[in-house]
């Protein structure tokens, strides 16, 4: 009798242990899942990459009049290997808004000495003649100190060149006027200066509202901004439309 009673107690104990173990495993699994969920939801997405570039970039900009843009472009594309051999890389091509045969070409350069030698090379003069360039092109070497690469809907750009009394004074005044430019349909894209003279300034802005921008260019508000920034003389402005970006 005692033997039967002991066997019954033993069976009950084994069953209870089995049920308790199963219940414990279930609870541990739920806790693990809850912990994983909590870790996932607590992660914050990484910030978007900055579109602002402040590392100086040397460039050569050529503005030239052509007889026929389509014919000029064929010759220009065919001469790409010569530009690359001189460390010049295609960047932007634009056409004047008032005269579409007035073409602006901007190239990034690796070596200023090579690039200067290239623009003086008879090969370039022959290529321009073959492409139908009229008259002498305007060639300038600049250093971009700031650029915004954000994508914009507007492809119209204004390239303005002028001289200032002091680069740092100008830069501070220019930054202070950013909101005023934005309110008048003008978005900053490039700030730079002549390769060897930071008192010869180059600005490229996007025109997002042509009517507002045109009025602002003639306004007393902009005139006062220039005076406060130490701008000398009358700025030279060229409006163009980007037709190719590399």
Image (tube, helix red, strand yellow):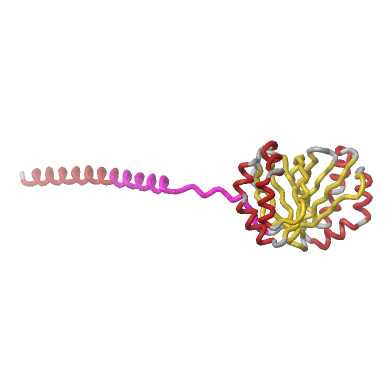
Q: Which one is in front, 219 or 155? A: 219
Residue sitting at x 77%, y 40%: 243
**Residue ranking furthest to the left:** 1
The stretch of residues the image draws in magenta is 27-55
Task: Give residue 118's position: percent from left, percent from top.
Answer: 87, 57
Residue sitting at x 83%, y 50%: 62
Relative placement, left or right, of 20 versus 1 is right
Relative placement, left or right, of 45 versus 128 is left
Taking the magenta stretch, the answer to whether it contains residue 224 is no
Q: Which one is in front, 203 or 234? A: 234
Q: Which one is in front, 13 or 169? A: 169
Residue sitting at x 86%, y 53%: 82
Taking the magenta stretch, the answer to whether it contains residue 28 is yes
Residue 34 in view, yes or no: yes
Task: Give residue 225's position: percent from left, percent from top.
Answer: 66, 52
Residue sitting at x 69%, y 54%: 227
């Amino acid at each position: 009798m005692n033997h039967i009673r002991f066997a019954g107690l033993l069976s009950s104990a084994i069953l209870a242990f089995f049920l308790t173990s199963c219940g414990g495993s279930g609870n541990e699994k739920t806790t693990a899942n809850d912990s994983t969920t909590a870790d996932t939801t607590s992660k914050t997405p990484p910030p978007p990459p900055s579109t602002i570039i402040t590392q100086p970039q040397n460039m050569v900009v050529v503005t030239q009049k052509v007889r026929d843009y389509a014919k000029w472009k064929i010759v220009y594309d065919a001469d790409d290997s010569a530009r690359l051999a001189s460390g010049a890389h295609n960047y932007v091509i634009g056409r004047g808004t008032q005269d579409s045969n007035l073409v602006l070409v901007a190239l990034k350069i690796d070596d200023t000495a090579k690039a200067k030698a290239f623009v003086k090379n008879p090969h370039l003069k022959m290529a321009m003649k073959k492409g139908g360039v009229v008259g002498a092109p305007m060639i300038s070497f600049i250093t971009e100190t700031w650029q915004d690469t954000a994508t914009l809907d507007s492809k119209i750009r204004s390239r303005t060149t002028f001289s200032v009394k002091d680069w740092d004074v100008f830069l501070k005044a220019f930054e202070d006027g950013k909101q005023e430019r934005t309110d008048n349909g003008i978005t900053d894209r490039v700030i730079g200066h002549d390769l060897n003279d930071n008192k010869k300034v180059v600005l490229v802005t996007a025109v997002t509202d042509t009517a507002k921008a045109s009025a602002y260019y003639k306004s007393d508000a902009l005139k006062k901004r220039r005076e406060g920034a130490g701008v000398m003389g009358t700025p030279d402005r060229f409006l163009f439309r980007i037709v190719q970006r590399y």
